[in-house]
Image (cartoon, rainbow, N blue to C red):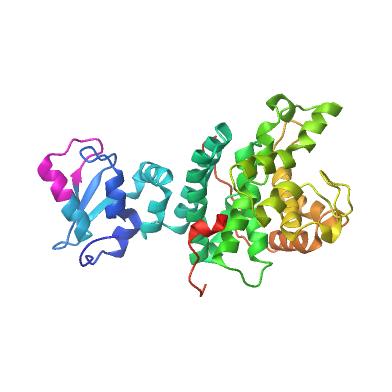
Amino acid sequence: MTIGKPSPIPENISEEYYQISDEMLSSFPKYRPPVDLFRFRETILTLSPFSRKGQRLTNEQVEEVQQLCGEGCLFVSRSDHPIYSEHIVKQLDLALQDSNLKETELIDICIRALLMRFENFVQQPVRIVFDPLFQDVMVLTEILWQDKHRIKILMRRLLTTTHTLANHSLNTMAVGLWLWMNSTSSYRRRDLDRTTLALFLHDIGMIKVPQFIVSRAGALKMEEKEKINAHPFVGYKLLQKMDVVFDEMSAAVVQHHERLDGSGYPQHLKCDTIHRIGRLTAVADAFAAMIATHPYGKAKDMLQAAQELAQDRNRFDPQFTGKLLTALQTNTFGDMTNINLPDAGQEPDEPEQALE
């Protein structure tokens, strides 16, 4: 966001450089910006270097930088995207202020931010650590609310690597959201907020399962199975203590291992006694687990995983498995290239309403 009349920026410059917003500039160290800065010269319609990354600026230069930014004449090279994006990852709401980010860059930054917040919450599952995670999820839902087609980009970014709870949770959220958005004729912003948060935290009870059980390649003992089978209720109780429980959350957390024929756990529910979000999360959770490498098995190809789920009509909701399979068969998502990351019409509701 810039102050004053924006300068006429040639298209070739916009392709190679970011125009820095006031919010973004304020996230940098005042005297030592971590990126190369460039100024736009209107007389010759080109950029010239202003300062090098890490260079200490004088008080006069700091004032000049702020003035250039306000005029829309301050830029950073896209080659500095890793540094630039790190600041947004840590302050994700900046992404909503930066119209110069490409949509793929926007989604990639969201993914990195959510993985970071999730890992922090796993290490310390308390309300004070949950709140930043919640706010970043609300940034993602705002991005999707602005343009629902962005969910396709999120689907193309599935993390098909070694299973971790964070990767699995993000993959389940992406798949589940795509299915939900493509199976729901209309929804409010609050519905989107709650469903996204529920899908992302559906497996949070697994943080209480000892790592030696999770990482075991061989058969589990009876008492070890019992610990795993208890994780839906454990997750529910954990979130209940923090007052983060609502219908969608309860269904996703408690019912994602229930199966239509009653063979699931922990309550052995059947068919329509399983909440729609529970059935949705079951499909997304199973698919996310199948496309990742585990100690007990290799990752399956996405199409193969979708085919197996669609064939298992007695246990998984055909409405959701069929949509997923058709999308993969017809390449609806486009090129499903994963990324390697560190281990509308109506006015939207306020994000806080997701937890009311």
Q: Quadrant of residue 343?
A: top right
Name the one closer to the observer, 161 or 106: 106
Quadrant location of the C terminus in the rendered image: bottom right
Residue 212 found in image quarter = top right
Q: How many marks?
A: 0
Magenta-tinted stretch: 50-65
Hey, which residue is sitting farthest top in the picture? Answer: 212
* Picture layout, residue 333 above or below residue 168: below
Name the foreground residue: 133 vs 45: 133
Report if residue 58 lies within the magenta region. yes
Position of residue 235 measured from the top left corner of the image (x, y, whole percent): 68, 41
Where residue 71 appears, as percent x and y from the top left, is 19, 60
Give the residue at x 55% y 40%.
118
Query: On the rendered structure, is 29 left or right of 198?
Result: left
Q: Is residue 42 above or below residue 338?
A: below
Q: Quadrant of the N terminus?
A: bottom left
Q: Residue at x 86, y 48 (%)?
A: 268
Q: Is residue 335 visible?
A: no
Q: Nearer the viewer, residue 309 or 135?
A: 135
Q: Nearer the viewer, residue 348 or 63?
A: 348
Against 137, is 57 above or below?
above
Position of residue 32 in the picture relative to residue 219 (left or right) = left
Residue 344, percent across and down? 52, 72
- Most extreme residue toward the bottom, as rendered? 345
In the image: residue 78, left or right of residue 124: left
| Image location of residue 10, percent across then percent down | 27, 64
Which residue appears at 72% of the width and 43% of the height?
289
Whether the magenta-drawn stretch holds residue 206 is answered as no
Question: From this viewpoint, is residue 230 visible?
Answer: yes
